[in-house]
Image (cartoon, rainbow, N blue to C red):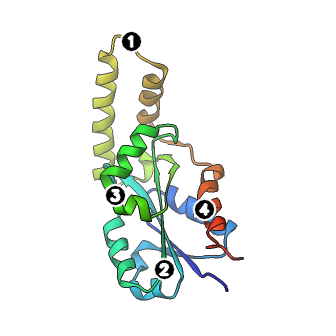
Amino acid sequence: MENKIILIYKSSTGFTKKYAEMIAKEIDCTLADYKTASSETMSDYDTVIFGTRAHAGRIDGYKKIRELFQKSTSGKFVLFVTGASPDTAGDTLEAFWSQNLSAEELAEIPHFYMPAGLCYEKMSLPDKLMMKMAAAVMKRSIKKKPDKTEQDLAVERMISSSYDISDKTYIKPLLSFLKKTNADCS
């Protein structure tokens, strides 16, 4: 039996779309922009994958997509989030997931993080201002530290300008999950 998959993505600066396209090259799925998502469309598919960004500590667009999914007849929901943090920031990622997903959602929804980067050039003005302010606060905090770690210095460098750390290797856990659960029957 073929399992039909739709991958809905919400991308502001291009990183999530880039990952969605990478995933679509590896599995047989339909790509759809967040703006066109509906419960009716989702109902035409067995599996819904939602990709979006971490934005101000939240999963951007998650509430709307989750509500649409719950109204649909689709059976599986998978989530991936892109962000500026390296994938090695384990404690930070665990806190992020716990702040955004209930204990039930954490147990039921397969969720994946994919490091992406920052693109100041494509950010909206409010996002750009928010990031510049956050960067200034972080820089001041790091400068006050008597014993700066290499990680402190790396964070300071990263938030100062645009960068891209996205890589195809970060989609592997999601692809492995799909293959293991037979979501990708192609």
Mark 4 Cα shell of 10 Å, populated few (<14), some (14-19), many (≥20)? some
Residue tagged 4: 177
Is disc 2 placed on a helix, strand or loop? loop
Where, by quadrant of the figure, is residue 23 drawn? Answer: bottom right
Q: Is residue 122 above or below residue 33?
A: above
Q: CA distance from mark 1 to mark 3?
A: 37 Å
Q: Of tags 1 and 3, which is closer to the observer?
A: 3
Point out which mark residue 39 bears: none
Q: Amino acid at mark 4?
A: Phe
Q: CA distance from mark 2 to mark 1?
A: 51 Å
**Quadrant of the drawing holding the N terminus:** bottom right
Mark 1 Cα shell of 10 Å, populated few (<14), some (14-19), many (≥20)? few
Is disc 4 placed on a helix, strand or loop? helix
Q: Are marks 2 and 3 in contact (CB under 8 Å)?
A: no
Residue tagged 1: 147
Where, by quadrant of the figure, is residue 52 drawn? Answer: bottom left
Q: Amino acid at mark 1?
A: Asp
Q: Amino acid at mark 2?
A: Gly
Q: CA distance from mark 1 to mark 4?
A: 41 Å
Mark positioned earlier in the residue sequence (1 or 3): 3
Residue tagged 2: 75
Is disc 1 placed on a helix, strand or loop? loop
Residue tagged 3: 103
Q: Of tags 2 and 3, which is closer to the observer?
A: 3
